[in-house]
Image (spheres, rainbow, N blue to C red):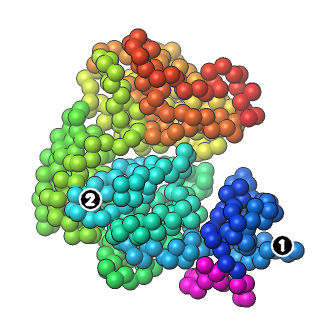
Amino acid sequence: MLLKELFVDFPLFSPENIPDVEINNIVIDSRAIKQGDLFVAMQGRDLDGHAYIQKAIDNGAAAIIGDKDLDGLAVPYVKLENTRHALTWLAAAFHGFPARKLTVIGVTGTDGKTTTSNLLYKILVQAGIKAGMISTVNAVIGNEILDTGFHVTTPDAHDVQRYLARMVSSGLTHVVLETTSHGWSQHRVDACEFDIAVVTNITHEHMDEHGGYENYRAAKARLFESLEWTRTKPQGNPRLGVINFDDKKSFEFLDKFIKTNKINYGLGEGSDVRGMNIDYSPSGIKFTAVSRNFRVAVSSNLVGSYNVSNCLAALSAAVHGLGINPQVAAQGLASLEGIPGRMERIDMGQNFTAIVDFAHTPNALKSALEAGRTMTQGRVLCVFGSAGLRDKEKRRMMAETSAELADITVLTAEDPRIESLDGILEEMAAGAISKNGREGETFWRVPDRGEAIKFALRLAKEGDIVLSCGKGHEQSMCFGKTEFLWDDRIAMRAALAEFLGVAGPKMPYLPSQDKPEKEWLKG
């Protein structure tokens, strides 16, 4: 494709006299540049892509796009006002605007995005619809499952458009796209032409990144705003917003904010799609979904009241947005066996329950602990940490939540990065103490995560439940500036194997096992 062809339908400010240069691909990492590629230089939190322009040229870049005044380059240079914003539209144009050929269902929220996305995907498949999915865990294109990264939120804009283009070429007609506040604030999904927008909840998360709840909520709300600028598609545009009636802070805002069709779901009286007659058990949930034009029995292998809400969100979008038969939608909900790292049981023959969950926000941890209570008559033991260089306020909040809802709390590492792990644990301990936690009796600090899981297992008694929260499906943990391979599920199996004296995997390595903090803080 010629460089100037990327700007034919460009909605932002477009420069004049774009050179006639042929490009083979769009790349944002200078190390990945191949002969004939277009390098888009962007400014990030830690790095500025403009510093790597010469390296991109040396590697074969045919042209450069940036947002700084530069001259004297050996290849054509196009200056734009905001390359991060522009990237999504440039990538969409390069791939032929694939979202315009798909029905796109966007899912956002603080907690439950991945679960709701998977539930929706299962409903679409059950209905015989050729659907794909892009989530924080993976991208599903037909029979192909692609890993979307270690610590990824919404994939970068050019990756999203590449996935969508592959879906179109594979003959898919629908896609479920999980979106994050970072994805919206960084314009990664602006060109995705959403037809249906779903929110799970908007609670405390990323306050450091967005500067407060209102800004965070506004970033999420861009999904619903995007319904207005989606172009008319041959297959039609439902333009439906699906919002959580029970999440009052977000509901009151979004109910007024949304200018297109909208519907709400919840457990409370007055919701458009309501969950009633709910039965919780250690093996799943059962309830009746009631709306103005249907009543359907729902069963799911997922646990906890929050998953009733996730099921209702998916059901509402499928039935009211896409016209899928409620019975078929219920069958799709029932077909989801589970999601990696979401209340995932690890059973190696122990006489208590061991679970790995992704809960890494105060609300998610609360939901996980409450779900744990429904699964056992014994005690609830919880292992978790709080990330470095991220929202510091939630460290105290999560420790407070666990001190109130768990019987035993073990505070440990979760991506400390270049912050002091001991310092993070001190902040968390203060939160636990503020809710009457007693160190050495109801809560402990065990910096190494593997040792923390082992410690919790040693405290567990028959019938108890041990929850390791915060990492879920993630495949790495950051100490200093290094990502170490880490999977909480492998760690739990390794700890259980040692506890039971049976064969099992080796505990993954973290520097907290054998290095003083001062050594890895610099790494």
Q: Is residue 454 above or below residue 425?
A: above
Write the residue at 61% across / 27% down: 510
Label 1 neighbourhood size at 10 Å, few (<14), some (14-19), many (20+)?
few
Mark 2 vs 1, N-terminal side: 1
Q: Which of these two is toward me, 193 or 421? A: 193
Q: Which of these two is toward me, 444 or 195? A: 195
The magenta segment is 1-20
Write the residue at 45% across / 79% down: 229
Identify residue type, mark 1: Ala
Magenta stretch: dominant secondary structure = loop
Label 2 neighbourhood size at 10 Å, few (<14), some (14-19), many (20+)?
some
Q: Quadrant of the C terminus?
A: top right
| Residue at the disc numbered 1 | 74
Give the distance between the C-alpha atoms of the residues marked 2 and 1, in whole angstroms: 50 Å
Write the residue at 31% across / 18% down: 349
- The residue lying furthest to the front in this view is 35
Write the residue at 32% across / 17% down: 350
Identify residue type, mark 2: Val
Q: Is residue 151 above or below residue 323?
A: above
The answer to whether one can see residue 523 in this image is yes
Give the secondary structure at mark 1: loop
Q: Position of residue 360 (x, y in %)?
A: 48, 40
User: What mark, if any, has residue 125 been given in the picture?
Assistant: 2
Task: Say which of marks 2 and 1 sits in front.
Answer: 1
